[in-house]
Image: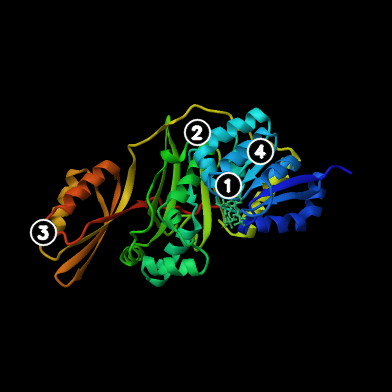
């Protein structure tokens, strides 16, 4: 009989507790697949367990505590002690990836983190292993379930952002402090990880520009419906020659886009490369048992002896000259000549309008337009100029739009 695989659990909350149960439930199947039976060597909580003891008795250390301290210290100590590490902690990888990968390489052990991005959806494995030899051009998608739930509910019910957020908290789809989810920071950490793996460049959280969904209004949702658009918080990492761009922003999609039907707390990630055209992966982005199942997959890979390499690579420059298409929402005085003045500002900036919807509201009118792709800097300057015009009744609101219309291809 071969030795059991002894697993130390740092953290025993939602994911750690679910993993503990899953290890017991799936022990026979794991033994059948790998030849070795998994066994929990010890558990660390705030008031239970001893890190040194767990370190001494484990072959694989699973970090499910969250946060970056003392987590970083524990993970580094485990790697230096020759233990493989599995973690679900996106902040830890996004902020300290270089240090952790260097340490793992020097110690000749693995660090795996499938559950850190898109929960149960195996995006890391696909990018890092299945597509290891593919020149990836773009990775993008919905990587935060909380915001996707909120935007889906806003679109379905017409309710205000704050009301839907409160409901998401009641249902457990949003945390008591939802800041990092709704302001885009959580998605930014996940996109830093995906960009690092897709482009082999040491992208860190600070390289990712992010915006959240806090300012989206029911009005935006209503107009979007009229224009055949749906709103998503998108993470986009793309290669542009020798540069890359990694960003998170709310964005309207046309109905035929593969990400448009992704609703509720689900996640979906698309990968584009010349050799594969595109791949879309979707599924539950969080949840105790779903996340634990991704963690267990990493444990099985380690026991089976598969080892992805994290070679240090030259850092690609972050691109700043981005072009996008935009939705622009303007509240204006309902008087002659307004549309022409706005069109003049946009025209002088070289921005062309794709569609316009206008509605009267007493003395005021709402003008909602979608403009074709243009440099973001030029668009920002034009919006600032429009904002200063005397007939404006509120600050303009702009949200990016992906114009691309996906046509189903024949079989
Ligand atoms: N929940 C999800 O759906 C999900 C999805 C994807 C990724 N993740 C990631 O998975 C990780 C764990 O999340 P979770 O939801 O399971 O968290 P959680 O329910 O809050 O559990 C955290 C666990 O870590 C322990 N812990 C925290 N700080 C500690 C410290 N300084 N010393 C010792 N123990 C400590 C806690 O101890 P006590 O039990 O004593 O409080 C608890 O057992 C996080 O990195 C999270 O981002 C979670």
CB of mark 3 within 8 Å of CB of mark 1? no
Calculate the distance from the C-alpha at mark 2 to the C-alpha at mark 4.
22 Å
**Residue corresponding to mark 4:** 78
Question: Where residue 10 sits: x, y (%)?
Answer: 65, 49
Counting residues from the N terminus, which is met first, the one under dot 2 or under dot 3?
A: 2
Q: Quadrant of residue 18?
A: bottom right
- Residue at the image point whose x is 53% and y is 48% from the top: 67
Counting residues from the N terminus, which is met first, the one under dot 2 or under dot 1?
A: 1
CB of mark 1 within 8 Å of CB of mark 4? no
Circle 4 crowding by C-alpha within 10 Å: few under 14, some 14–19, many from 20: many
**Residue corresponding to mark 2:** 202
Which mark, residue 337?
Answer: 3
**Residue corresponding to mark 1:** 123
Calculate the distance from the C-alpha at mark 1 to the C-alpha at mark 4.
25 Å
Circle 3 crowding by C-alpha within 10 Å: few under 14, some 14–19, many from 20: few
Q: Quadrant of residue 275?
A: top right
- Residue at the image point whose x is 70% and y is 34% from the top: 82
């Amino acid at each position: 009989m071969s030795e059991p695989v002894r697993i130390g659990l740092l953290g025993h909350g939602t994911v750690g507790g679910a993993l503990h149960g899953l290890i017991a439930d799936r022990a026979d199947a794991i033994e059948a697949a790998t030849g070795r039976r998994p066994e929990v060597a010890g558990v660390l909580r705030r008031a239970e367990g001893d890190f040194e003891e767990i370190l001494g008795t484990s072959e694989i250390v699973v970090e499910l505590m969250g946060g970056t301290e003392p987590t970083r210290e524990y993970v580094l100590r485990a790697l230096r002690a020759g233990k493989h590490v599995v973690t679900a902690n996106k902040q830890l990888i996004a902020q300290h990836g270089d240090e952790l990968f260097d340490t793992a390489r020097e110690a000749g052990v693995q660090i795996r983190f499938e559950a850190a991005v898109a929960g149960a959806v195996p995006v890391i494995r696909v990018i890092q292993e299945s597509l290891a030899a593919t020149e990836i051009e773009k990775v993008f998608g919905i990587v935060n379930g909380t915001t996707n739930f909120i935007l889906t509910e806003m679109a379905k019910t017409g309710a205000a952002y704050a009301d839907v957020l409160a409901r998401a908290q009641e249902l457990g789809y949003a945390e008591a402090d939802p800041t990092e989810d709704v302001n885009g920071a959580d998605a930014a950490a996940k996109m830093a990880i995906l960009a690092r793996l897709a482009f082999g460049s040491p992208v860190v959280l600070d390289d990712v520009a992010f915006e959240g969904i806090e300012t989206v209004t029911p009005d935006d949702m209503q107009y979007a419906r009229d224009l055949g658009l749906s709103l998503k918080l998108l993470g986009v990492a793309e290669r542009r020659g020798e540069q890359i761009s990694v960003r998170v922003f709310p964005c309207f999609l046309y109905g035929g886009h593969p990400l448009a039907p992704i609703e509720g707390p689900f996640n979906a990630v698309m990968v584009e490369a010349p050799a594969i055209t595109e791949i879309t992966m979707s599924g539950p982005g969080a949840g105790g048992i779903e996340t634990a199942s991704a963690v267990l997959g990493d444990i099985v890979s380690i026991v089976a002896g598969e080892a992805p390499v994290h070679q240090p690579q030259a850092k690609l420059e972050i691109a700043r000259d981005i072009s996008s298409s935009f939705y622009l929402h303007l509240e204006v005085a309902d008087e002659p000549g307004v549309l022409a003045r706005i069109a003049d500002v946009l025209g002088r900036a070289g921005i062309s309008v794709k569609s316009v919807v206008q509605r009267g509201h007493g003395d005021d009118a709402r003008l909602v337009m979608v403009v074709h792709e243009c440099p973001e800097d030029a668009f920002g300057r034009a919006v600032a100029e429009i904002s200063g015009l005397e007939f404006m009744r509120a600050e303009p609101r702009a949200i990016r739009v992906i114009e691309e219309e996906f046509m189903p291809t024949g079989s």
